[in-house]
Image (cartoon, rainbow, N blue to C red):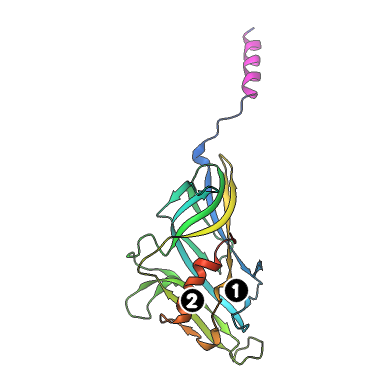
Amino acid sequence: MFLAALALTGCKKDGIAPAVNRDDTRLEVRFVFTDRGLPLEQDRFVRDFVHTLCRVDELGFMLSGTTALDDQGMPIGSWPSVHIVADLASPQQTTMLGRLDPGELHYLDVRLGPSDPHAPPTGALCDTTAGDPRWSALVVKGVVDSNDDDHITPEDQPFVIRCALPAEQEMFRIHAHTSVTEGMTATLMITVDVHALFHGIDIADEPQCIAPSLFNRQALANLTSRVLGEPN
């Protein structure tokens, strides 16, 4: 009888779904680099605003202060101190943000740069051109077809776009969607349209775009308004 009771008890437990640990509901982020909606080719050739051929060798920026929002714009997760680094050289890199509520994620509210702008800058986003190290909001390096023969050759000129971190790190919204299932890790893919970064910019006209010039300001505006995420 005792063995029979154990067998019956086992049958009942088999029919009960295991409890889901909501702390295991997490979000990670990965950037996908594209060129006008298509995957960025391995050679990384893109066209600037005046259709000049460019090869992008480096592209990097950092996001922080992240809040995930559902389709109604309600917060379902927040990670103010986590840094999300985009690096063209590491397209498979993912950043774990942490736990959030299950549901449909539609937006991220973020800001450019680190959570603490006074922290010592590191890596490619460390700018020393003005002496003391300071954070860059955006760095892009490559080669532009400076002789206008529609080829990238050793004779062509290198270019660099380095945008300083704004004094006011204003929040902006990225439209990117994923479904978050309870008890699982969801991966949010954020599109980075490299071509859109050059909207309104003639690279050959200003290949050293470091000072706060018109093209420099345009690149930073493009990053937050045209480059990131999906169209609304």
Q: Residue visible at 37% across and 78% down?
A: 128
Q: Which mark is residue 154?
A: none
| Residue 37 seen in render | yes
10 relative position to 163: left or right? right
Q: Nearer the viewer, residue 4 or 45?
A: 45
- Is the magenta region chiefly helix, strand or loop? helix
Residue annotated with mark 2: 218
50 relative position to 99: left or right? right
Q: Quadrant of the C terminus?
A: bottom right
- Above or below, 153 against 222 in this view is below
Q: Nearer the viewer, residue 60 or 230?
A: 230
Q: Residue visible at 52% across and 78% down?
A: 141
The location of residue 98, given as percent across then percent down, is 48, 48
Picture quarter containing residue 48? bottom right
- Above or below, 38 against 104 in this view is below
Q: Nearer the viewer, residue 161 or 221?
A: 221
The location of residue 37, given as percent across then percent down, is 65, 67
The mark nearer the N terminus, 1 or 2, is 1
Asked if residue 6 lies in the magenta stretch, the reply is: yes
221 relative position to 150: left or right? left
Q: Secondary structure at mark 1?
A: helix
Question: What is the C-alpha distance between the residues marked 1 and 2?
Answer: 13 Å
Q: Which mark is residue 195?
A: 1
Of badges 1 and 2, nearer the viewer stands 2
Asked if residue 74 lies in the magenta stretch, the reply is: no
Q: Residue visible at 44% across and 49% down?
A: 78
63 relative position to 91: left or right? left
Circle 2 Cα neighbour tier, 10 Å, few/some/many (<14 / 14–19 / ≥20): some
The location of residue 230, given as percent across then percent down, is 59, 61
Q: Which residues are magenta?
A: 2-15
Circle 1 Cα neighbour tier, 10 Å, few/some/many (<14 / 14–19 / ≥20): many
